[in-house]
Amino acid sequence: MKVKKCEKCGNETYQEGNICVLCKIGVTQMYRELDDLIKKNNKWNLHPRKAAGTR
């Protein structure tokens, strides 16, 4: 089998159609969207947790 490059992401693949499994199921796109979202909203509104029974 020849190693081919994925048409969408450039990863090496053995799949027919030159599209890797990650791109077929959408993992690559979801990763990019999450990365963009984190970069846009880099201020997190994190509140410290309080221990049970304290005020």
Image (tube, rainbow, N blue to C red):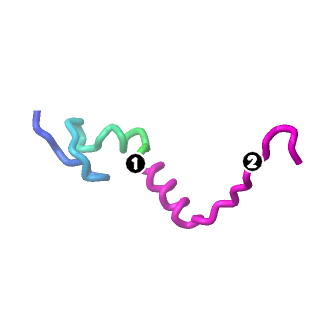
Dots 2 and 1: beta carbons under 8 Å? no
Q: Quadrant of the N terminus?
A: top left
* Residue 4 placement (x, y as % from top left): 16, 44
Residue 39 within the magenta-colored segment of the rendering: yes
Q: Nearer the viewer, residue 55 or 40?
A: 55
Q: Which mark is residue 49?
A: 2
Residue 44 within the magenta-colored segment of the rendering: yes
In the image, what residue occupies the spot 57% across and 65% down?
A: 42
In the image, what residue occupies the spot 24% across and 41% down?
A: 17
Q: Which residues are magenta?
A: 29-55
In this picture, is 19 found above or below 45?
above
Disc 1 marks a residue whose amino acid type is Thr
* Separation of residues labelled 2 and 1 (CA atoms): 34 Å
Q: Secondary structure at mark 1?
A: helix
In this picture, is 17 found above or below 31?
above
In the image, what residue occupies the spot 48% across and 57% down?
A: 35
Mark earlier in primary sequence (2, 1) = 1
Q: Residues within 10 Å of mark 1 (few under 14, many from 20)?
A: some
* Residue 44 placement (x, y as % from top left): 64, 60
Count of number-bearing discs:
2
